[in-house]
Amino acid sequence: MSDLKSQFEAAVAASKNLSERPDNVTLLKIYALYKQGSTGNNPDPRPGFSDIVGRAKWDAWNTLKDTAPEAAMQQYIDLIESLS
């Protein structure tokens, strides 16, 4: 697990130095995988209609509900590597 955790942390650092900015759909996937991998299931209520960005982030994270944090970490690592 610690090896996966260190790879995850390295991928988080690498995500800040991507050569070009990913599209919004990919950014939401990166966000959701990061949150699921680091926090687990989303404990917060869904934001209201006026918070469009918060709602999109919540929806993206909620699609990963019950995904094991380790699986989300590995998917995050794979996604960042594919974008590098």
Image (tube, rainbow, N blue to C red):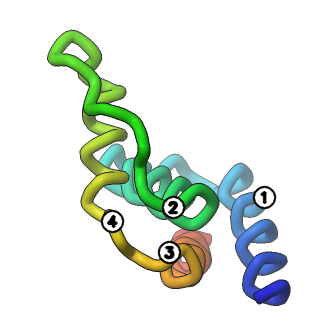
Closest to the camera, between mark 1 and mark 2, is: 2
Mark 4 Cα-neighbour bin, 10 Å: few <14, some 14–19, many ≥20: many
Quadrant for the C terminus in the image? bottom right
Contact between marks 1 and 2 (CB within 8 A): the answer is no
- Residue that numbered label 3 is attached to: 72
User: Relative to 49, does residue 53 appear above or below in the rendering?
Assistant: below
- Residue that numbered label 1 is attached to: 13
Task: Residue 40: give its label.
Answer: 2
**Sequence order check: which comes first, mark 4 or mark 1?**
1
Q: In which quadrant of the rendered view does residue 54 lie? A: top left
| Distance CA(mark 3)–CA(mark 2) | 9 Å
Closest to the camera, between mark 4 and mark 1, is: 4
Contact between marks 4 and 3 (CB within 8 A): the answer is yes
| Residue in the picture at 80% in, 70% down | 10
**Sequence order check: which comes first, mark 1 or mark 3?**
1
Mark 2 Cα-neighbour bin, 10 Å: few <14, some 14–19, many ≥20: some
| Residue in the picture at 50% in, 75% down | 72
**Sequence order check: which comes first, mark 4 or mark 3?**
4
Secondary structure category for the residue under label 2: loop
| Distance CA(mark 4)–CA(mark 3) | 8 Å
